[in-house]
Image (cartoon, rainbow, N blue to C red):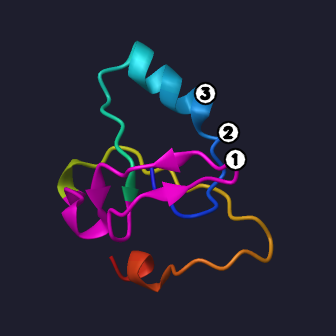
Amino acid sequence: MFVFNGFSDWEPALAIAGLQQFTDVEVNAFSVDRLPVRSMGNVQVVPDLSLSDLPKTEIALLLLLVVERGMKIRTRRFFRW
């Protein structure tokens, strides 16, 4: 799951809980640089991985979360990945 300052923390909650509880899928949070980020709900998340650490050949599902209208995030590095 890609996390960034201002990501919507409530949207992926049910999907992540279901994946963790009912499958053998490992869920990891990642950011561009692996630095801690804060969600829209002000929850601090410390990503497991940075974008460059992602094992591209092992990804089964990639969760990309909604960005609030008018919010600015730096996505160029992400989309070059």
Between discs 3 and 1, the one toward the N terminus: 3
Q: Is residue 39 left or right of residue 68?
A: left
Indicate the position of residue 45 as horizontal and vertical percent values.
Answer: 46, 48
Between discs 2 and 1, the one toward the N terminus: 2
Query: Which residue is found at the position 38% from the left and 50% from the top?
Result: 46
Can residue 45 be seen here? The reply is: yes
Rounded to the nearest angstrom, the CA distance separating label 3 from label 1 is 16 Å
Instruction: Report the amino acid beneath label 1.
Output: Gly
Instruction: Report the amino acid beneath label 3.
Output: Leu
- Tag on residue 41? 1
Q: Is residue 48 magenta?
A: yes
> 15 and 10: which one is in front?
10
Query: Which residue is found at the position 29% from the left and 22% from the top?
Result: 24
In the image, residue 66 sits, relative to residue 51, either above or below, namely above
* Badge 2 vs badge 1, beta-carbon distance below 8 Å: yes
**Of tags 2 and 1, which is closer to the observer?**
1
Query: Which residue is found at the position 36% from the left and 63% from the top?
Result: 35
- Tag on residue 10? 2
> 71 and 18: which one is in front?
71
* Label 3 Cα crowd, 10 Å radius (few <14 / some 14-19 / many 20+): few
Instruction: Check disc 2 and report its element: helix, strand or loop.
Output: loop
Indicate the position of residue 23 as horizontal and vertical percent values.
Answer: 36, 19
Query: Which residue is found at the position 67% from the left and 41% from the top?
Result: 11
Instruction: Report the amino acid beneath label 2.
Output: Trp
* Label 2 Cα crowd, 10 Å radius (few <14 / some 14-19 / many 20+): few
Indicate the position of residue 56 as horizontal and vertical percent values.
Answer: 23, 59
Range of the magenta residues? 31-56
Q: Which residue is mark 3?
A: 14
Q: Quadrant of residue 66?
A: bottom right
